Amino acid sequence: MNKLNDNIVFPCGISMKNRFMLAPLTNTQSYEDGTLSDDEFLWLTLRAKGNFGLTMSCASHVQEIGKGFPGQLGIFDDKHLDGLKRLTDEIRKFDSLSVAQLHHAGMRSPEEIIGESPVCPSSDEETKSRALSNDEVKILRDDFINAAVRAKKSGYDGIELHGAHGYILCQFLSSSINKREDEYGGSLENRSRIIFEIIDGIRATCGRNFLLGIRLSAERFGIKLSESKTLCKQLIDDGKIDFLDMSLWDSFKNPVEEEHQDKTLLQHFTEIDRKNVLLTVAGNIRTGSDVEKIISSDVDFVTIGRAAILHHDFPNKVLENNEFIPIDTPSPKEHLRKEGLSETFIEYLKVFKGFVEE
C-alpha cells in the first residue's frame, strides 16, 4: 500500500514530498484589486510549514470580470506578481510545491462586485448573464494561458484549471447551460474544446516541466457522470496533464444518478486507466482514518480542506497518529486565530452553520 509520507513524482518530473495537498479554499482575505494580503500570505505559508506537500492557493481569477467573491486573490494583471512571488518564495522554504488555481466565475460573478453583467457560454436569464461572443471565448482562453505564464513568472511550480463547481469552464461543459451553436457548444467534444485549447496553450508557453492539473466536478452543476468520466479519459489520453483533481463533495458516497449506483462515486474514477496521470480527490476527508481509506483505494494523494482549516499541521498529526481526529466544531474563534485565520476568514466561515463557535 502507498505510504502517506512517500515521495511521488508527477509526469512532468516534479516530485511531491508526501500525499497531502491543501485544497484551494475560498477565504476572502486578499485586497479587492486582487493583490496578496498579509493575512492570505500567513494562511497559506503556515500550511506549507505544517507539512502539506502541495500548497494550492485559492481560486485566482484570470479576468477582472471573472471575480467570484470579495477579497479574491487575482492573477489577471502583472500588478499581482510581486505578492505572488513573495508567497511562492516562502512556500518553497518548507519544501512544499506551490500551485495556483486558475479561475473565472462566469455567470456566478456577482454583478455588485464586478460592476457589470456577468458572462456565460450562453445567456442566462436567472443570473442576468450575457453570452460570450466567439471572439470573447478566444480572449478568455488566452487569458487563462496568460495567467499560467504569470504564475510561472511568480515562481509557482504549476497551476490547476478550475473546471468544477459551476464556474465558467464547468459552464462550458454543462449541456444544460451551454447552448452555443459554434465550435464551443453542442457535443462534449465541442463543449470541452476550450479546456483542451487552454491546456495546449499552457504547454506551449510554460513548457513540459510545469505542473498542470485540472479540477472537475464528477456530477451536479449540470454535469453528467458519464460525460465526466469520458472527459477524464480524453484528458489522460491527450497526454498533457499531470494530475486530475476530482471534487466529489463526499468521497465515500454513491453517485446521484441511479443508473451509476452500482459502485461508489470514487470507484468510478479509480477504475479509469490513468496511465501516468496522478489522481487526487476532495470531499469529506476529515480524519486520519479517512485519509488511509482514500489512499488505500488507489488514489495518489488527498486534498484536504476543512481539516486544514482546523489544523495547519494536519499532515503531521496524521503521520504521527493515523487515527487522528480534528478538534470538534463549532470551533472557538481563538483556536482559529492560532491556526492562522484572520477575522475576515473567520467571519466568512460563519456562512457554514456550526463551524464557528458563537
Image (spheres, rainbow, N blue to C red):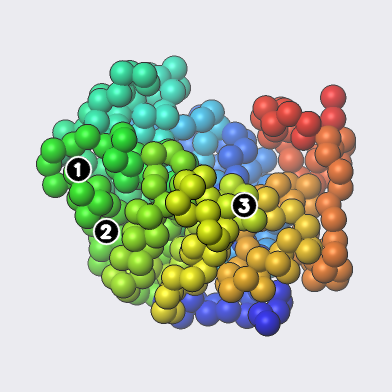
Task: Give the amino acid type for the residue marked by disc 1 in the picture.
Answer: Gly
The number of discs equals 3
Identify the residue shown where x is 78% and y is 47%: 310
Q: Earlier in the sequence, mark 2 or mark 3?
A: 2
Q: Which of 277 and 26 is in front in this view?
A: 277
| The disc label shown at residue 185, or none | 1
Residue 281 in the image, given as x and y percentages of width and height: 57, 59
Residue 165 is left or right of residue 47, and the answer is left
Marks 2/3: CA–CA distance: 29 Å
Mark 2 lies on residue: 196
Q: Distance between the residues labelled 2 and 1?
A: 14 Å
Find residue 28 and report its image quarter. Answer: top right
The mark closer to the camera, 2 or 1, is: 1
Q: Residue at x 55, y 42 (%)?
A: 36
Q: Nearer the viewer, mark 2 or mark 3?
A: 3
Q: Mark 3 points at which residue?
A: 253
In front of the other: 171 or 314: 171
